Amino acid sequence: MALIDSTKHAEQEQVLSNVEPSRRAFLKKSGAYATALGALSTSGSVFAASNGAPTLTLSTEWDKTFDKSDKVEHKKVSYKTRYGITLVADLYVPINITGKHAALAVSGPFGAVKEQSSGLYAQTMAERGFITLAFDPSYTGESSGEPRNVASPDINTEDFSASVDFLGSLPNVDRERIGVTGICGYSGMALTAATSDPRIKAVATASMYDMSRSMSRSYKDSYTMEERHKVMDYLGQQRWADVDRDSYGLGYHEVPFDDNGNIVTGERVLPDTLSANPNPVLAIFFDYYRTKRGFHPRGINSASAWTATTPMSFFSFPMYANIEMIAPRPVLLIAGDNAHSRYYSEDVHKLSPNNAELMIIPDADHVDLYDQMDKIPFDKLTAFFQKSLA
């Protein structure tokens, strides 16, 4: 819960008196009302996680991997999920707007933070007239949750719905005009959220990854049945190791095998340096997360790894299993022509009942759609959400 600057309290209460009662009650209950109304001081804020995690101090500097826009107002905000986890997000609002507007919740890539690609998407779409929210998923970045570096298909799906809760409680957001955008691995969570949350009126994905499929079957479903069982056995033994030492080890979220069929372990997603002839996919991720282009110290992919047991829940929780429930609400799937992940978007397009559009970006790989402004189709995204959230 955000601690409110006492000098701002009277002003906040005055503004809240003009907010409809149901929204005012939610904002007070969630501890988000100061930030929702833009009253959180940018000089600093602190929240205490409700699950016993240590008090966290939020950064107050502009520490994004992209330049700050002078066309939008930026505020750091916090709010709770239905699991009691406090999410921290960046709220971007077009300057000098009046009335109620369409809004977007954005997250991803998997293992990234809001200061990276999702923030770039959110700020750019705010420049184009939307109220946007780029959030750190539970257990990562500045959001709460212990232990750290946990991913969960269920909890991270809830993160999107909790972000819709927050956006819909802002006095300048039209509750009937809220969409979501998922980048890379959070595309699957965005789609899954929409299958059960009808308040999400439209979904866009970029460089989609299905993390359940990736972790339980590996790249292009390449795990053999024997390898799948080996991974499951490894995860079970990892749990015993965690119990014995009373801490959670780190590891690869998509468990690799060496040439002899043995599981490869490690405590960093990406190495400090690349070999002379690196795997091309490893190289493009390294070029973003481990260089000045996209490095951020709070990003798991930049500086750490997921808890080693993270894949367990993804083995038993397939993403977007009920994807037909999104229709007739529209879906836009954006993928690079040269992206190793392209097949995920193509397969979702095939599964969708005529409500999904697939857009392939020429001469673009998976990571190009993280931050390359000449390749991310923001005009298309703007037109898609303007139409879908009209």
Image (cartoon, rainbow, N blue to C red):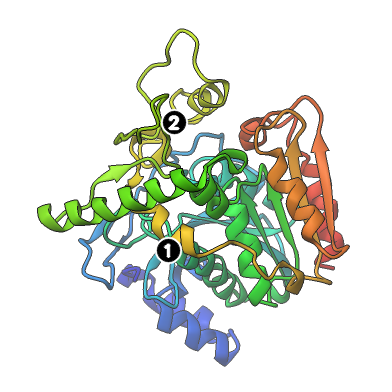
Between 345 and 105, the one lying in front of the other is: 345
230 relative to 357 in the view: left or right: left
Tag 2 secondary structure: loop
Residue matched to label 2 = 295
Q: CA distance from mark 2 to mark 1?
A: 21 Å
Give amino acid for label 2. Phe
Do the CB atoms of the residues marked 2 and 1 lie less than 8 Å apart?
no
Residue nearest the observer in this picture, 205 or 34: 205
Which quarter of the picture shows residue 130? bottom right
Specify the quadrant of the image occupied by residue 354.
bottom right
Determine the residue positioned at 48% across, 88% down: 25
Extreme-front residue of the structure: 226
Up-down relation of residue 180 to residue 211 (above or below): below
Where residue 12 sits: x, y (%)? 45, 76
Instruction: Name the spot of residue 302 as percent of width and height, x first.
Output: 40, 34
Q: Secondary structure at mark 1?
A: strand
Query: Is there any visible trace of residue 113 in the rendered image?
Result: no
Residue 44 can be seen, yes or no: yes
The residue labelled by disc 1 is 87
Q: Position of residue 341 (x, y in %)?
A: 65, 38
- Vertical relation: 49 (above or below) 215: below
Amino acid type at image mark 1 = Leu
Q: Most extreme residue toward the top, as rendered?
A: 276
Q: For this view, does 199 lie left or right of residue 185?
A: right
